[in-house]
Image (cartoon, helix red, strand yellow):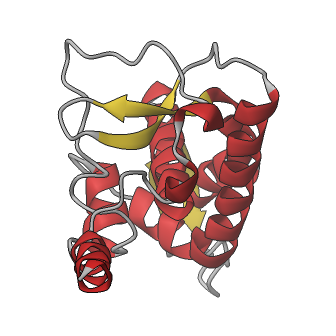
Amino acid sequence: MLVPLAILAIFLRFSHGASPQQSFECGACFMVLNETTTRILAADPTKKIDVGSFRVSPDGQQKGIKQVSYSRSDEFLFEILDDICTKSSNYYLTMNKSTGKLVYSFNSNVPNDKKTKKIRADLRNACDDFLDSQIDEIVKFLKNEHDEPIKQFCQIEKGICSAVDVTPFPIEEIPEEPLTLADIPEDEL
């Protein structure tokens, strides 16, 4: 009698589809899009650069050159992405009270204990792997402005995150205390 109930409980847990903790890949996607959009918005919107073909035609004209915003150029985007994964040291797991899910969130005052270091190291590795496989798609995506870039890319386009993973924190609920591995049950890691 207990065996069928245990099997049913396991089935219900995994068939529900929602994990109590955001995956490292989703956390990496969230972090990359959050950091890049922050840097893009902080860049000078009036700065432009020339892109295209710089060849001179036989009649002395340069055709194919156009001006684009520097903040949306390949040059700037690759510059941002070059060291983006080092930002993982500013992310930690916290509970989004509106969804009840553990998600990665930015905080420049993350404690530097042994357990938090492991979470950040795992997020850093996931970020490196994520960039290795998605960098061209990320740059292509970021060339245009989006209302909700994290939701659009990580959930809708790539399917890496669930709708719950990309639910913003309520305004009144700004994460304060980072969680450590000790706060997370072993079966959820």
Horizontal placement of 13 versus 65: left or right? left
Say which residue appears at 65% left-offset and 57% top-offset.
127
x then y, percent, for residue 7: 30, 83
> Which residue in the rendered view is the most extreme toward the right?
114
Question: Taking 89 as reference, is 166 above or below it?
Answer: below
Q: In this rendering, would 76 be left or right of 162?
A: right
Residue 69: tell me if it is visible: no
Circle count: 0
- Indicate the quadrant containing the N terminus: top left, top right, bottom left or bottom right: bottom left
Q: Quadrant of the C terminus?
A: bottom right
Depth check: give the residue in front, 154 or 162: 162
Pick whichever, 144 or 16, lies toward us: 16
Q: Quadrant of residue 119?
A: top right
Q: Residue at x 36, y 52 (%)?
A: 20
With respect to residue 158, does 91 lie above or below?
above
Q: Quadrant of residue 162?
A: bottom left
Residue at the image point whose x is 61% and y is 67% from the top: 130
Give the x, y percent position of residue 107.
Answer: 55, 20
Task: Identify whether 57 is placed above or below 42.
Answer: below
Residue 53, percent across and down? 61, 75
147 to the left or right of 137: left
The residue lying at 28 percent from left, 77 percent from top is: 2
Q: Taking the image as drawn, is residue 176 in sight?
A: yes
Residue projecting furthest to the front = 1
